[in-house]
Every structure is written in structure tokens, then in C-alpha cells.
Image (tube, helix red, strand yellow):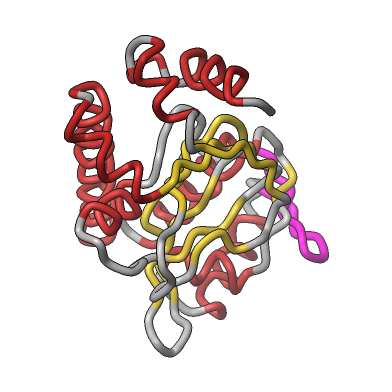
Amino acid sequence: MNKEDISSFIRRHFPVLGGQELADAIASRATALTLPPGKVLLNPGESINLIPLVVKGSVKVVRADDSGHEILLYYIHPGESCAMTLSSCLKREKSRIKAVRQQKTEVIGIDAGQAYMLGRKYPAWFDFVLGSYAQRFDELLEMLDAIGFSSLDERLVKYLKEKSELLDTLVLHLSHQEIADDLGTARAVVSRMLKQMERKGMLRLQRGRIRILTLV
């Protein structure tokens, strides 16, 4: 994809960024990427070279500790970027999160050095960054509310609903361990709750898959 095509792509999928001047500036040092599902885009401690603007698909962002335990922070949807990556880029820090592609994903990768300078010249880019921060802050508050005030079974139902909507499928290729990691609990707990949901007719468990029937 040439620079003119990338600029057109940005204007079409990220209208909040304004007119052609900013889109052309981004496109001058941007790269269009098509990424396969399941592959890690960024690990904690890695240098940030590209800021992703998601055009199609989705990216899961998690926080991981030294022992490998993870907890889901948020998803990056089309028309969005990663607030944590933007923050680390602006502060010239290494990554503090892990980003994993959930499905075949198309992104515009902005050179990290250029992303730092865009905010100094283009108010629309600065507004986009602030909007990303505000959106993720609200999502993190919702996550804290769920952890503090919702039962685990309520969180599991919400998680499966959101995952099904995100991937636009009723068949989720998820391991019990992956769900447990995302919810910050034990695999045995998730397995027991899924069995209970299966007995209630809410889903059907298959090898490596969960078929959604009705989640209420």
C-alpha cells in the first residue's frame, strides 16, 4: 500500500483525526500491516517502535507479572489505538503491557518517534490521544467495578458475551486457562462455572471450544 492509499485509509477509518494534512503527515512514515491471529504484537519491557491504529480486527491488551499471570485490561477495536502504548511512547518508556491479536487484524503502524512529534503540531492528534486515555480510563473503572462489586459468575457471563460480540461468532476457541487468565482467577474455578452454565443450557463445552447457546 502506497502513502496515498494509507492517507486515504486513515481519513476513512479515523475521521476524528481531521483533514488531509494530518493524514498525509501520518502516512509519510506509516506502514500498513496485516497481522495473523494469536500472535503477540508487543511484550512488557520491549521498545515501542510502532503505534498501532486498528483498521480491522481487534487486539487484546493484558497486564502480565513476572510469573506469567495475566489480567485483561481492554480490547482495541477498529478506529482505536492503544492508550498504554501511546502513554509509554510519549514518556519514552518501554512497554508495560502485552498486546495480542485476537483475529486477522489490519493496522496502520505509526513510527513512534513521529507519533511523539505529531502532538506538538496537530491539535487533532493531541485530541485523539486524550480521547484514547479517557476511553481506556472509563473501561478500567468498569473493570474495577466488576472485580469489586460483581460476582465471578456475572463477570464470566459478561466476558463470554463481549468475546462473542467482538469476534462475531457463537463458537469461541478459548481454553479454560485463557479465560481464567483474563478474569484473574484459577482455571479450576472457571471450569466448574462453565460446567454449571452448560447444565443450565447456556452453552455447550467442546474440545478447545465453547459454543454459546443463550447467555442471560
Within the magenta stretch, is there residue 78? no
Q: Magenta region: which residues?
A: 203-214
At x 48%, y 30%, the residue is 28
Figure quadrant of the N terminus? top right
Frontmost residue, 90 versus 38: 90
Residue 70, image x and y in percent? 44, 73
Frontmost residue, 200 versus 110: 110
Above or below 158: residue 10: above
Residue 58, image x and y in percent? 56, 42
Frontmost residue, 63 versus 158: 63
Residue 134, image x and y in percent? 19, 37
- Left or right of 103? Residue 181 is left
At x 36%, y 15%, the residue is 21
Magenta-highlighted stretch: main secondary structure?
A: strand
At x 59%, y 63%, the residue is 40
Quarter of the image where one finds residue 5? top right
Above or below 11: residue 101: below
At x 41%, y 68%, the residue is 47
